[in-house]
Image (cartoon, rainbow, N blue to C red):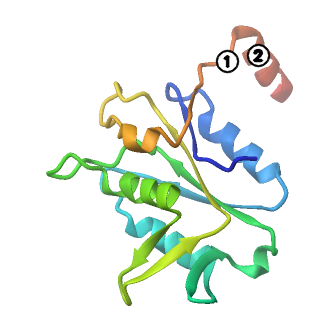
């Protein structure tokens, strides 16, 4: 209910992505936008996602970005960032896309480049999944972002659960 960011972290094949996406897709008033992060992911992917799923509205002197009305008036856009800890750090040690998400969560908006206007975000949430930072190619995420995003550790299912899962298909 708090709509704060959330990250599932666990070994490859433990079902993080499948679990998270199936739960989100089953919820009402949720529009899910799935993004697959890579070492070259930049903040532009977030802005492109916003342009596909959101609209800008003027409210008094403010500009607000929120999910399009065609999704429903109380609908939330949940941006699922798979492999959230893959983006490479720049020469300053920053993962730009992660710091952009931190700004969106912490400040509640961003500066739009084309007109230097502050844009508030409304009804937009970020969730992610990742392998542990000790895996090859993974980056340790900034504590400045992680203070806003609880990390839930996911492990492989037990033998009994695996029998039940695969027994269902046989």
**Residue assigned mark 2:** 161
Residue in the foreground of this view, choosing between 3 and 77: 3
156 up-or-down from 57: above or below:
above
Alpha carbon separation for disc pair 2 and 1: 6 Å
Q: Report the residue at 40% width, 60% height from top.
A: 100
Check disc 2 and report its element: helix, strand or loop.
helix
Q: Quadrant of the C terminus?
A: top right
Rendered image quadrant of residue 97: bottom left
Could you tell whether 134 is left or right of 154 in the image? left
Rendered image quadrant of residue 158: top right
Residue in the foreground of this view, choosing between 159 and 77: 77
- Residue 140 percent coordinates (x, y): 33, 34
Residue in the foreground of this view, choosing between 166 and 4: 4
**Residue assigned mark 1:** 157
Q: Do the residues labelled 2 and 1 touch (CB within 8 Å)?
A: yes
Could you tell whether 152 is left or right of 71 in the image? left
145 up-or-down from 120: above or below:
above
138 up-or-down from 94: above or below:
above
- Residue 45 percent coordinates (x, y): 43, 66
- Name the outermost residue toward the top: 159
């Amino acid at each position: 209910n708090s709509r704060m960011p959330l990250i599932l972290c666990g070994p490859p094949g433990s079902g993080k992505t499948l679990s998270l996406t199936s739960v989100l897709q089953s919820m009402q008033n949720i529009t899910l936008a799935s993004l697959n992060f890579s070492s070259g992911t930049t903040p532009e992917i977030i802005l492109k996602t916003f342009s596909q799923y959101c609209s800008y509205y003027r409210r008094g002197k403010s500009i607000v970005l929120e999910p399009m009305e065609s999704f429903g008036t109380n609908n939330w856009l949940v941006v699922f960032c798979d492999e959230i800890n893959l983006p490479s750090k720049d020469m300053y040690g920053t993962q730009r896309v992660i710091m952009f998400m931190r700004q969106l969560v912490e400040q509640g908006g961003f500066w739009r480049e084309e007109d230097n206007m502050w844009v508030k975000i409304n009804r937009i949430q970020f969730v992610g999944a990742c392998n542990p930072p000790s895996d090859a190619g993974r980056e340790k995420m900034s504590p400045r972002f992680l203070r806003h995003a609880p990390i839930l550790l996911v492990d492989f299912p037990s033998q009994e659960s695996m029998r039940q899962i695969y027994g269902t298909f046989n």
